[in-house]
Image: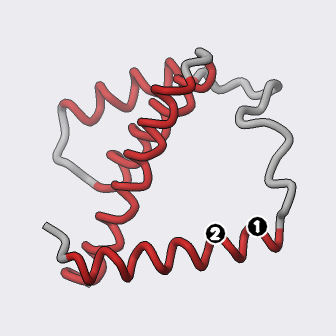
Amino acid sequence: MIEPGKLNGYLVAIKEELRKAEGKHPDFCEALLDPESRVSWADAESSIKRHNATSKAYADNVLMEEMAEACAAIGAGDKDHAKQELAQVCAVAIRMMHRLDVNG
Protein backbone atom coordinates (compact mmCIF):
# COMPACT_ATOMS: atom_id res chain seq x y z
CA MET A 1 0.00 0.00 0.00
CA ILE A 2 1.14 3.49 -0.75
CA GLU A 3 1.29 5.65 2.34
CA PRO A 4 -1.10 8.66 2.29
CA GLY A 5 1.79 11.15 2.43
CA LYS A 6 3.55 9.53 -0.53
CA LEU A 7 0.29 9.35 -2.50
CA ASN A 8 -0.32 13.04 -1.87
CA GLY A 9 3.18 13.80 -3.16
CA TYR A 10 2.47 11.89 -6.39
CA LEU A 11 -0.86 13.68 -6.82
CA VAL A 12 0.84 17.06 -6.31
CA ALA A 13 3.39 16.15 -9.00
CA ILE A 14 0.57 15.11 -11.35
CA LYS A 15 -1.30 18.39 -10.71
CA GLU A 16 1.87 20.37 -11.46
CA GLU A 17 2.42 18.49 -14.74
CA LEU A 18 -1.23 18.98 -15.68
CA ARG A 19 -0.97 22.74 -15.14
CA LYS A 20 2.21 22.87 -17.25
CA ALA A 21 0.58 20.85 -20.03
CA GLU A 22 -2.53 23.04 -19.99
CA GLY A 23 -0.33 26.13 -20.28
CA LYS A 24 1.80 24.68 -23.07
CA HIS A 25 -1.04 23.05 -25.02
CA PRO A 26 -4.32 24.76 -24.03
CA ASP A 27 -6.29 23.17 -26.88
CA PHE A 28 -4.93 19.68 -25.99
CA CYS A 29 -5.93 17.73 -29.12
CA GLU A 30 -8.19 17.55 -32.15
CA ALA A 31 -9.83 14.31 -30.99
CA LEU A 32 -9.24 11.53 -28.48
CA LEU A 33 -8.51 8.98 -31.20
CA ASP A 34 -6.85 9.52 -34.58
CA PRO A 35 -9.53 8.76 -37.19
CA GLU A 36 -6.83 7.96 -39.76
CA SER A 37 -4.98 5.53 -37.52
CA ARG A 38 -4.64 1.95 -38.64
CA VAL A 39 -4.57 0.84 -35.01
CA SER A 40 -7.54 -1.20 -33.88
CA TRP A 41 -7.64 -0.58 -30.16
CA ALA A 42 -9.99 -3.53 -29.65
CA ASP A 43 -7.44 -5.79 -31.39
CA ALA A 44 -4.58 -4.22 -29.43
CA GLU A 45 -6.48 -4.78 -26.19
CA SER A 46 -7.02 -8.48 -27.02
CA SER A 47 -3.39 -8.97 -28.00
CA ILE A 48 -2.00 -7.29 -24.88
CA LYS A 49 -4.41 -9.21 -22.62
CA ARG A 50 -3.32 -12.52 -24.20
CA HIS A 51 0.32 -11.61 -23.65
CA ASN A 52 -0.22 -10.46 -20.06
CA ALA A 53 -2.19 -13.60 -19.20
CA THR A 54 0.80 -15.80 -20.05
CA SER A 55 3.75 -13.76 -18.81
CA LYS A 56 5.09 -12.29 -15.61
CA ALA A 57 3.58 -8.99 -14.54
CA TYR A 58 5.51 -6.00 -15.85
CA ALA A 59 4.30 -2.48 -15.19
CA ASP A 60 4.70 -1.32 -18.79
CA ASN A 61 2.52 -4.17 -20.03
CA VAL A 62 -0.14 -3.48 -17.40
CA LEU A 63 -0.09 0.21 -18.34
CA MET A 64 -0.47 -0.61 -22.04
CA GLU A 65 -3.35 -3.00 -21.31
CA GLU A 66 -5.22 -0.32 -19.37
CA MET A 67 -4.55 2.26 -22.10
CA ALA A 68 -5.73 -0.13 -24.81
CA GLU A 69 -8.89 -0.83 -22.80
CA ALA A 70 -9.51 2.90 -22.44
CA CYS A 71 -9.01 3.60 -26.15
CA ALA A 72 -11.18 0.65 -27.13
CA ALA A 73 -13.95 2.00 -24.88
CA ILE A 74 -13.55 5.48 -26.39
CA GLY A 75 -13.76 3.97 -29.87
CA ALA A 76 -16.92 2.10 -28.88
CA GLY A 77 -18.48 5.30 -27.54
CA ASP A 78 -18.66 4.00 -23.96
CA LYS A 79 -17.71 7.13 -22.01
CA ASP A 80 -18.30 5.68 -18.54
CA HIS A 81 -16.13 2.64 -19.21
CA ALA A 82 -13.48 4.82 -20.85
CA LYS A 83 -13.32 7.07 -17.78
CA GLN A 84 -12.99 4.02 -15.52
CA GLU A 85 -10.16 2.66 -17.65
CA LEU A 86 -8.41 6.05 -17.75
CA ALA A 87 -8.60 6.17 -13.95
CA GLN A 88 -6.93 2.75 -13.97
CA VAL A 89 -4.23 4.13 -16.28
CA CYS A 90 -3.60 6.84 -13.68
CA ALA A 91 -3.55 4.28 -10.87
CA VAL A 92 -0.95 2.19 -12.69
CA ALA A 93 1.16 5.31 -13.35
CA ILE A 94 1.03 6.19 -9.65
CA ARG A 95 2.05 2.66 -8.73
CA MET A 96 4.96 2.95 -11.16
CA MET A 97 6.01 6.24 -9.53
CA HIS A 98 5.91 4.52 -6.16
CA ARG A 99 7.89 1.56 -7.45
CA LEU A 100 10.62 3.97 -8.57
CA ASP A 101 10.78 5.33 -5.02
CA VAL A 102 10.81 1.89 -3.41
CA ASN A 103 13.06 -0.02 -5.81
CA GLY A 104 14.85 2.71 -7.72
Q: Residue 16: percent from the left, percent from the top?
A: 59, 79
The correct choice, above or below, for 28 with respect to 24 in the image is above
Q: Residue 18 vs residue 88: left or right?
A: right
Quarter-of-image position of residue 31? top right
Quarter-of-image position of residue 25? bottom right
What's the amino acid at mark 2?
Answer: Leu
Q: Residue 101: percent from the left, percent from the top?
A: 27, 83
Q: Which mark is residue 40?
A: none
Q: Residue 77: percent from the left, percent from the top?
A: 62, 17
| Mark 2 surroundings: few (<14), some (14-19) or many (≥20) residues within 10 A | few
Q: Report, in whole angstroms, how far the alpha carbon at label 1 lies from the one at label 2.
A: 6 Å
The residue drawn where x is 82% and y is 26% is 36
Q: Residue 25 vs residue 33: left or right?
A: right
Q: Name the residue under label 1.
A: 22
Q: Residue 65: percent from the left, percent from the top?
A: 39, 38
The correct choice, above or below, for 95 with respect to 87 in the image is below
Q: What secondary structure is marked by label 1? A: helix
Q: Which residue lies furthest to the top in this view?
A: 76
Q: Residue 102 vs residue 10: left or right?
A: left
Its colouring scheme is secondary structure
Q: Residue 37 vs residue 79: left or right?
A: right
Q: Mark 2 points at which residue?
A: 18
Q: In which quarter of the image is the N terminus?
A: bottom left
Task: Check if mark 1's residue and mark 2's residue have beta carbons within 8 Å.
Answer: yes
The residue drawn where x is 50% and y is 36% is 83
The residue drawn where x is 26% and y is 53% is 58
What's the amino acid at mark 1?
Answer: Glu
The residue drawn where x is 77% and y is 32% is 34
